[in-house]
Image (tube, rainbow, N blue to C red):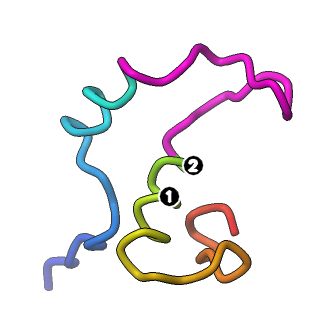
Amino acid sequence: MKSVPDRHNISDKVFQLLELLLPGPRSLWTGIAKNNRPFITGLFWIFSTGAAWPDLAERYGG
C-alpha cells in the first residue's frame, strides 16, 4: 500500500522557492543553522493546525 504524504509537509519545489527568501545559514540566536526546512515545515504545521509552539509535533523538531 502506498503511503500518504503528510499534508503539512512542504514540497521540494515550494521549499526551493522559499529558501531563496530565507537568510543565510547564520542565525542570530542559535549560531549556524544547518537546515531551515524543519523550522519552515514546523511553522506551516503550527499555522495549519492552530496548535501552540509547545505542542509542535516531534517530527517537526518539537
In the image, what residue occupies the spot 14% across and 85% down?
1
In the displayed structure, 53 sits above or below 15; it is below
Seen at 19% across and 35% down, the residue is 13
Q: Residue at x 62, y 80 (%)?
A: 52
x and y, in percent, of residue 61 in the image? 66, 61
Q: Amino acid at mark 1?
A: Leu
Which residue is labeled 2 in the image? 39
- For the residues bearing labels 2 and 1, Cβ distance under 8 angstroms: yes
Quarter of the image holding residue 54? bottom right
Which residue sits furthest left?
A: 1
- Horizontal side of 38 relative to 6 (left or right) equals right
Q: CA distance from mark 2 to mark 1?
A: 6 Å
Q: Is residue 36 above or below residue 23?
A: below
| Residue 15 on the magenta span | no
Q: Residues within 10 Å of mark 1 (few under 14, many from 20)?
A: some
| Coordinates of residue 53 in the picture (x, y in percent) | 67, 72
Residue indicated by mark 1: 43
Return the x and y of residue 57 as percentages of the image width and height: 59, 77
Secondary structure type for disc 1: helix
Rendered-image quadrant of the C terminus: bottom right
Q: Which region of the structure is painted magenta? A: 20-37
Q: Nearer the viewer, residue 40 or 52?
A: 52
Q: Is residue 20 left or right of residue 22?
A: left
In the image, residue 13 above or below residue 43: above
